[in-house]
Image (cartoon, rainbow, N blue to C red):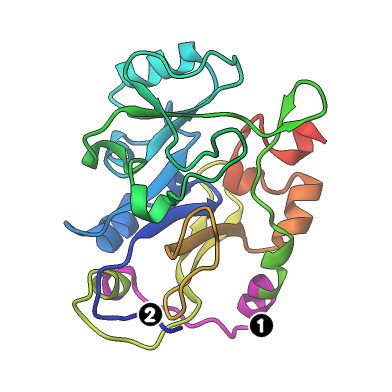
């Protein structure tokens, strides 16, 4: 099923990779005044405050949540402490209840839209590996085909201003996977690139629903190899939930 390209599409920022690693002007062009979406950053302590209008501060404790909110962020808290939702928070509406899906997807919820969304802060239970360690749930193994096509030069480059108009339904287009931006990582200076998928055919991701997805990846190494070697630092920083820390 093809997407109706003259309808507004919702955007998932950083399906893998921290969206605060991409310059603000790129996100400003993509979102404009009407595109909605979801996004989370572990760089909330150090990145420019402008990112808080689009993204949630990704935190892992009540203390971190209070700190981030004092800095003007809405928060997405992984409940490693097992305390549930506190004042000003709600459980992620997509999260299963007693193992039963709620029928809500990120695409229909959109509460994780930073300060542009007037809503409570979000709490989600962690995915546990072993007895105590929480692990990032993003599976990068299937991204190899997308990375290989980009590395061969088979992925068209499309300006974020054009893609923003496409997401808003202002223009038509024939897009599949595109390169939106490339440049140095603010985390360690390595070359990174942002790719966007789901533009011509809805994403099959059952959690997010048919959102347009962005992936911020190292330029030098396929994502699965970057995860295994620790080279994902260029796009994920020192996030303690990285697989290299929890293997």
> Looking at the image, which residue is at 49% across and 52% down?
14
Foreground: disc 2 or disc 1? 2
Residue position marked by numbered label 2 in the rendering: 3
120 part of magenta stretch: no
Nearer to us in this view, 86 or 35: 86
State how far apart marks 2 and 1 are (Cα). Answer: 26 Å
> Looking at the image, which residue is at 30% across and 62% down?
30
Nearer to us in this view, 108 or 214: 108
Residue position marked by numbered label 1 in the rendering: 152
- On screen, residue 121 versus residue 137, left or right, reads left
Picture coordinates of residue 144, whole percent (x, y): 71, 69
- On screen, residue 47 versus residue 189, left or right, reads left
> Looking at the image, which residue is at 18% across and 77% down?
170
Picture coordinates of residue 61, whole percent (x, y): 53, 16
Instruction: Judge the density around disc 2: few (<14), some (14-19), many (≥20) Cα neighbours within 10 Å.
Output: some
Instruction: Judge the density around disc 1: few (<14), some (14-19), many (≥20) Cα neighbours within 10 Å.
Output: few
Picture coordinates of residue 22, whole percent (x, y): 43, 52
Element marked by disc 2? loop
Quarter holding the C terminus?
A: top right
Element marked by disc 1? loop
Nearer to us in this view, 199 or 109: 109
> Looking at the image, which residue is at 61% across and 47% down?
234
Magenta residues (range): 146-162
Question: In the picture shown, does residue 202 fall above or below 186?
Answer: below
């Amino acid at each position: 099923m093809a997407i109706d390209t003259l309808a507004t599409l919702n955007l998932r920022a950083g399906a893998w990779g921290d969206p605060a690693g991409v310059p603000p002007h790129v996100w400003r062009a993509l979102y404009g005044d009407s595109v909605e979406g979801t996004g989370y950053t572990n760089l909330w302590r150090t990145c420019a405050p402008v990112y808080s209008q689009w993204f949630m501060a990704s935190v892992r404790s009540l203390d971190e949540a209070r700190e981030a909110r004092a800095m003007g962020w809405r928060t997405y808290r992984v409940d490693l402490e097992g305390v549930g939702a506190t004042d000003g928070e709600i459980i992620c509406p997509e999260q299963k209840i007693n193992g039963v899906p709620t029928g809500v997807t990120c695409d229909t919820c959109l509460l994780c839209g930073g300060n542009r969304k007037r809503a409570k802060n979000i709490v989600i239970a962690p995915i546990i590996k072993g007895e105590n360690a929480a692990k990032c749930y993003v599976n990068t193994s299937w991204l190899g085909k997308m990375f290989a096509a980009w590395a061969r030069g088979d992925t068209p480059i499309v300006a974020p201003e054009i893609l923003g108009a496409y997401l808003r339904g202002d223009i038509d287009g024939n897009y599949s996977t595109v390169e939106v931006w490339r440049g140095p990582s603010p985390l360690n200076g390595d070359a990174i690139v942002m790719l966007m998928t789901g533009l011509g055919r809805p994403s099959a991701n059952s959690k997010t629903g048919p959102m347009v997805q962005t992936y911020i990846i190292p330029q030098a190494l396929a994502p699965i190899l970057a995860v295994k070697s620790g080279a994902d630092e260029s796009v994920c920083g020192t996030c303690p939930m990285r697989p290299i820390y929890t293997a």
